[in-house]
Amino acid sequence: MATTGLYQHSTVAALKAGVTAGNQTLATLLTHGDTGIGTADRAAGDVTILDGQAYQSQANGKTKALASSAKIPFAMLHANEPTIEQTFENVDYRVFEQQLLSLYPYKNLLVALRVTGTFTTVDLSVKRAEPAADDSTYRQFTGHNVTGTLVGYYVPTVYHGVTQTGFHLHFLNQDKTFGGHVTGYRIDTGLVQLQALASLQVVVPTHDTEFLNRRQ
Ligand SMILES: [Zn+2]
């Protein structure tokens, strides 16, 4: 699986337009990468893909492994082959992310980011299944002194419109029982791995009537 690119299934615009029913199997998506992030069927939480296994973190606080037959509506994946490793300690995410962009000349590149270690705090926001029973579309969680992995991407502004720009990270704890979409974190001790990605392939679900009929 030699690829240096990012593979994206569907678009953020399609998700926002309500195309949230799963329309591609994980088995197919995992032929394009072993690491990444995504959205669960009917937007019922967040998907994190690590080492070829996908996990769904739900708004009830639970995280579970997904079968390869599971269908999801959105994913970003790559083959994990990091080229840079550096340890960071005791740093808030705002400072850390600025440091990454000043240490490495990657401001205009897609970069896969993976941080494995211990986190003083990890703030998560997990989307509830649609339609939500009440107005609270997202549930917030904070993990304290948790060991696990942050995984995701830095997307430069040149890709604006195709996908979400900036840092987009998901978290999974070591036991794969807690995770979701990351809104903030503080690294206690973390091994940071970076991988610059030279291309972006966006593949849209041409067989999905919702995708075809909803204006995005
Ligand atoms: Zn996310």
Image (cartoon, grey):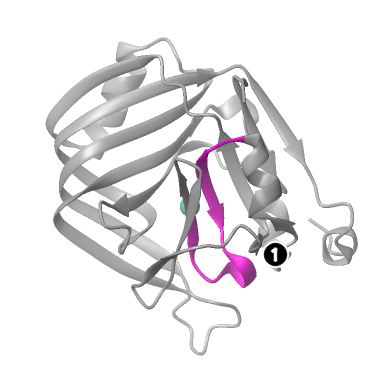
Looking at the figure, which quarter contains the C terminus? bottom right
Q: Is residue 51 above or below residue 45?
A: above
Q: Is residue 85 magenta?
A: no
Residue farthest to the top?
105
As helix, strand or loop, the secondary structure at mark 1 comes to loop
Q: Position of residue 27 (x, y in %)?
A: 66, 51
Q: Position of residue 166 (x, y in %)?
A: 47, 35
Crowd class of label 1 (few under 14; some 14 to 19; many from 20; radius 10 Å): some
Of the pair 32 and 113, the residue shown nearer to us: 32
Q: Position of residue 93 (x, y in %)?
A: 25, 38
Identity of the residue drawn at 39% across and 22% down: 194
Identity of the residue drawn at 40% across and 14% down: 83
Q: Tag count in the figure?
A: 1
Q: Amino acid at mark 1?
A: Gly
Mark 1 CB in 8 Å range of ligand 1?
A: no
Looking at the figure, which quarter contains the N terminus? top right
Of the pair 93 and 200, the residue shown nearer to us: 200
Highlighted range, magenta: 33-47
Q: Is residue 38 magenta?
A: yes
Q: Quadrant of residue 42?
A: bottom right
Horizontal side of 150 relative to 145 (left or right) equals right
Q: Position of residue 101 (x, y in %)?
A: 36, 19
Q: Quadrant of residue 78?
A: top right
Q: Is residue 112 above or below residue 165?
A: above
Identity of the residue drawn at 59% across and 35% down: 33
Q: Is residue 66 above or below residue 116?
A: below
Horizontal side of 200 relative to 51 (left or right) equals right
Find disc 1 in the rendering and name its residue. 22
Q: Is residue 141 above or below residue 190?
A: below
